[in-house]
Amino acid sequence: MNTHSADTAGPIGGLSTDAFSSMFQAISGLRNRRALLAMLGCLFAGILIAGLFSFLATRMGFFLAFLGGLAMFVASATGVNAAGLLLMDQAKGVPARSLPDAVMGGLFCIPKFIALGLALLLVSLVVFIAVALVYLVCKIPFLGPILFVLVFPLSVVVLGLTLCGLFQCLFLALPAIWEGSTIMHAIAKALAIVRSRLVESMLLLTVVGFLAMGVGFIVFGVLVTGLIPSAGMMGGILGGDGLGSVFGMLRGFGVDQGGDFGGGGGRGTGGVGYVVAAGIGGGLLWALAASLVSLVYLLGLNLVYLRVTEGLDVGATEAAMQAGFDDAKRRAAELSQKAKDAAERAREQARQSAAAAQAGAAAASAPPVYSAAPGVSAPPAQPATLPCPKCTAPVGADDLFCGVCGFKLK
């Protein structure tokens, strides 16, 4: 029994009093070492592979650059999904899986992520096409401007809700996939959240976003603060061929006409080595900073998902989706059968037209028949001849026996 009065009841719409404060637990994602290693390792491996392919692409063509970008995408997506799986275990309070299992699970989540993105893109295209058709109706003279008075604000609201809802579905379906749901069940959960708890989920995700932003300011602030004195020490200790000339090169200085760094004629190779080392070290720093910020956001995303799906009825949404898919399959089968029938009728008409054309061509190629002129008797008709069945000699149609072999014809 609820002992609270109407004035002290909890907020309407499912937002509990500790909903926002519980989102601060997302900061504890920084302490998940397995998730950090998974994301950091995958991101750093992707950076190295992409850098190697990009370096080779300058000599071997664009295809290697494409492969490098693809490898970077696969490695990054694997790291994000692996960290998401480990952080989902942390959010649910269950024993964390091993690091190799998380990485393999993250790799297998990539096809689901791509299928999810394509499904949501298809929905957005359908909505945009529908709005475009309505705008075409508004081109009708006189009636079009009257309709446009209502169509314009309605299209803004529809497209805004569609895009915001699809983005929410994309973000909230990822934790469902990390939880082990199928694509259909993940989309059904995301749609159920958007339909019944859209405002709550958006507010909670906003809080998580601000938390991740704050952690990002701290992380990058530490890196920038350490970079400034490090750059000065590099230039003073390592000299012109050291990392100081790398920063000089990035600013457009320190490169002479011969291509050597710092003006040293024989020291250019060392400068190139420092450039490569700086690129690898900088990639590691970038991967570390991105991983730390992402861990906070991913754990917060899992917490939002678990909170907004608590007590949520997904069965009705999933049943409606299944009914829609079945209806779409039925309509597609009907359209396919109609297309087959139309094609069969077209082939039959083509065969009839070809037969009629052949008959017309045969009639046109037959010898002309001339009628006798008035007063002129036609020449007597010659009796028809047939081949003898036995010796194939020509015989008359009225002959009783063959004149050559004597075979009885009748």
Image: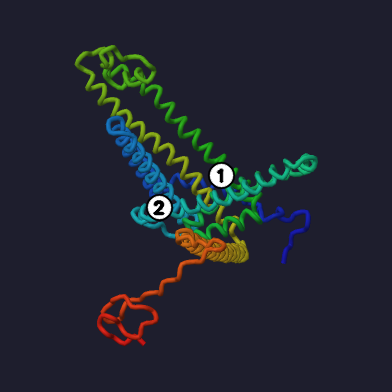
Quadrant in the rendering for residue 287: top left
Amino acid type of the residue that numbered disc 2 sits on in the rendered structure: Gly
**Mark 2 vs mark 1, CA separation in Å:** 22 Å
The residue labelled by disc 2 is 106
The tag earlier along the polypeptide, 2 or 1, is: 2
- Give the colouring mode of the picture: rainbow
- Could one spot residue 350 in this view of the protein? no
Kind of element beneath mark 1:
helix
Structural crowding at the residue carrying mark 2, measured as other residues with C-alpha within 10 Å and reported as few (<14), some (14–19) or many (≥20)? many
Indicate the quadrant where residue 10 lies. bottom right
Determine the residue positioned at 71% across, 53% down. 11
The residue shown at (37%, 75%) is 385
| Residue bearing mark 1 | 208
Figure check: 159 above or below 404: above
Q: Nearer the viewer, residue 16 or 171?
A: 171
In the shown orientation, is residue 331 left or right of residue 290?
right
- Counting from the top left corner in percent of width and height, residue 350 is at 51, 61
Residue 64 rendering spot, x and y as whole percentages:
32, 38
Examine the rendered structure and indicate whether residue 274 appears above or below residue 318.
above
